[in-house]
Amino acid sequence: MENKNILLECESGISGDMFVAALLDLGKEQEDLQKGLETALQSLPLPGFTIRISRVKKAGIDCCDFDVIVDKEHENHDHDMAYLFGHLDSDLEERHEHQAGHEHHSHHEEHHGRTYLEIKEIIQKGTLTENTKELALRIFAVLGEAEAKAHGTTLDEVHFHEVGSVDSIVDIVSAAYLMDALKIDRVYVDTLCEGRGTIRTAHGILPIPVPAVSRILEAYPITISRVPVQGELVTPTGAAILASICDFQKAPETYQIQNTGIGAGKREYEVPSMVRVLSILPSERSADTIWKLECNVDDAPAEELGYCMDKLFAAGARDVHFIPCMMKKNRPGTMISVICSKEQIPTMEDILFHETTTIGIRRCSMERTVLPRKPRSIETAYGSLQVKECTLPDGTIRLYPEYDSMRELAEKTGKSMLEIRKLVD
């Protein structure tokens, strides 16, 4: 089976169970996919549970629905909802059920929460492929780091409460298993929509997006669009999955749709709760293109140029560099080169005109070849290190350590940047 490129359409947000359902729907023609998932999940050392896969309709559209049913309990109709509301007293829980339009049941045996190391042990003991284990742990690491930052602690110390419960572990492991079983290579996100307002939690009223989600969006280049829906559309698990699998490149402008999967959500808002996954084959004529803007200046102080570079990067420039050049009348000058997307051109040009003395900007589009890449976390002798995994045309994998992560580890351990980099070589 050849690797797939998929495009996620998240106009109604995303949660863990929605994503799993969409992938199951995408691979519904693949023999033994569901049976393989059930076998993988049964290998985990978790309390008794079953999964239920069914068909439902959202706004008249046929969708796949994925549920995790924990023994001796009712269904958890929204796997991330308990994370938000904690263990509510019966009066508050009843008020929330009426407000949200669906049942909510807390998992009392999970009240203590699980640490990242406990979850890691559960996943490692399962009969799963290495790719599945690695992706599942990466998703939990993203989630844990966001939780730790939100609560002012560390990944090793943070306790996953409801996102560490049985059904949430099943959601994340299922997502990782299906990504591997379907041989999904590159993941693009079209639009990630999030609602507005606030949400009541066990700790009070919190703004949307909730802290864990906002920390994930802060740490990864995921762009959201706020839509006029009063309620949460993007859950912590959904955001962590996106951060762990996305290619963070613009989707091809032209492509052929090979297959479609639609996963149903549990919440009822003004928009139908579902996420759509398209398996796409990029057109040969849809090359990956970027734009280069250039201008020359010979009368700008270095301080002003440095400030201009900061503003360009803050506005989303892919790259900015200065090149010494010889200009008219034998004056030394600087060529400013900015790499950006077509949509960013007006913003970049506005910054160049306002922050430099240039009176003209050249621009051209360029095709480029980009290696498939994805972010991942690796365990080293000194702790976790964020790297970029790139695949060469011959299939060779290269790891490139992220500067900020190397710096953080160097400062934490007292080791040099050179020693930290050698951990990846």
Image (cartoon, rainbow, N blue to C red):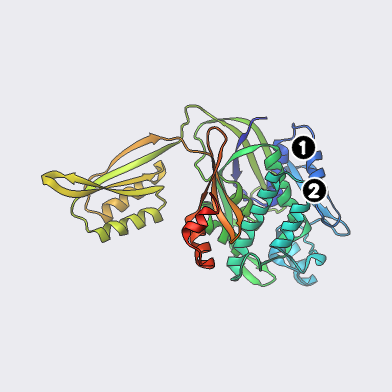
Q: In this view, does 350 lie to the left or right of 371?
A: left
Q: Residues within 10 Å of mark 2 (few under 14, many from 20)?
A: many
- The residue wearing badge 2 is 41
Quarter of the figure with residue 37: top right
Q: What residue type is labelled 2?
A: Leu
Q: In this view, does 218 lie to the left or right of 134?
A: left
Percent x, y of residue 360: 23, 45
Callouts 1 and 2 close, C-beta under 8 Å: no
Q: How crowded is mark 1: few (under 14 residues within 10 Å), some or many (20 or more)?
A: some
Q: Residue 33 carries which label?
A: 1
Residue at 36% across, 53% down: 312
Q: What residue type is labelled 1?
A: Leu
User: Looking at the image, how many numbered discs can be counted on the residues?
Assistant: 2
Percent x, y of residue 254: 51, 31
Residue at 59% across, 67% down: 150
Percent x, y of residue 162: 73, 62
Q: Foreground residue, 151 or 132?
A: 132
Residue at disc 1, secondary structure = helix
Is any part of residue 131 visible from this angle? Answer: yes
